[in-house]
Image (cartoon, helix red, strand yellow):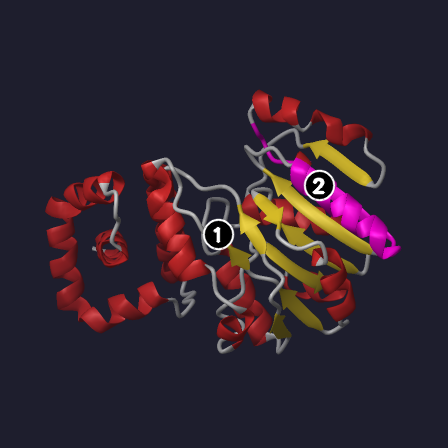
Amino acid sequence: MLSILIPIYQCEVLALVLSLLRQAEQTRYDFEIICLDDGSEAVFLEKNTPLKGMKGVIYQVLPQNLGRAAIRNHLADLAQGPYLLFLDCDSLLTSELFVSNYIQNAQADKVLCGGTVYQAERPIDPALTLHWHFGREREARSAAQRQTAPHHGFTSNNFLIPKAVFNQIRFDETIREYGHEDTLFGQSLQKEGIEIHHLDNPVLHDGLEPAHIFLGKTEKAIANLHSLNARGVFLNTRLEKARLKLGRIGQGLLAFLFFFLGKTLRKRLIGASQPSLLLLDLYKLGYFCGLGA
């Protein structure tokens, strides 16, 4: 049996679930789709209500928000199948062979990552351009590109894992906010010697967010990274490497400059019709150094 697991937060998932149902039924492989809502507003609960009566779908609204890591662990605990396919709720399928590709490549000792793509056209709303540009340039990578550093290329939005392997690792539930729970999970897989195989089996990231929300989530992710570092956990990210290269004096200087210029940089990123990823990188590094000052 294949257990398809979807954590839901502030998102309508009917299109995704219907696509998964159609494909899973065509494979003639036993499956279940488990959708858990983790504290969405009433408007999204109403939109997802039709899931309750669907054959092959388990839909539950949790009484309280668990957070990004804990809800994934809870989904795995509910799953009946030996293979778990995790998908983020803001995903859409890009291939009619998406489910069968995972089934055909599943192995009892390996994790499979399918990847992410973004729409080819620039969004009409300029507020969405920063997220779109970042996703296209930094996240939409081929399987061959991701396989060059397979564990560092792990992302939790689209992956298949044997349940026995998942129970060895599990997500760190101390991470409740957005960011780096997947980086830490990938590092844990590497430490346990568990192989990751990357496939060209992507989902479309359908949840583009306005620049101010995207930056807010970026800041939360950086804060999570800072908290992990404070606990002695280092993830070997680009941001950590960049800060290390600065040295103590450089970090202090950048933190000082960011204190005065950070708001200006943020406004430029939010208001730019052609956002610069170099400016975004500088903002992230300044924010990170400011947390450690």
| Quadrant in the picture for the C terminus | bottom left
Q: Secondary structure at mark 1?
A: loop
Expressed as whole percent of the image width and height from the top left, the position of residue 28 reads 89, 55
Residue placed most toward the observer, 236 or 273: 273
Residue found at x 23% / y 52%: 283
Q: Secondary structure at mark 2?
A: helix
- Given the image, on which type of amino acid does mark 1 rest? Tyr
Mark 1: give few (<14), some (14-19) or many (20+) Cα within 10 Å.
Answer: many
Residue placed most toward the observer, 108 or 210: 210
Expressed as whole percent of the image width and height from the top left, the position of residue 131 reads 38, 47
Q: Quadrant of residue 171?
A: bottom right
The answer to whether the residue labelled 1 contacts the one labelled 2, judged by CB atoms less than 8 Å apart, is no
Residue bearing the label numbered 2: 17
Expressed as whole percent of the image width and height from the top left, the position of residue 46 reads 65, 22
CA separation, marks 1 and 2? Answer: 19 Å
Residue bearing the label numbered 1: 118
As displayed, is residue 51 above or below residue 6? above
**In the image: residue 253, left or right of residue 212:** left
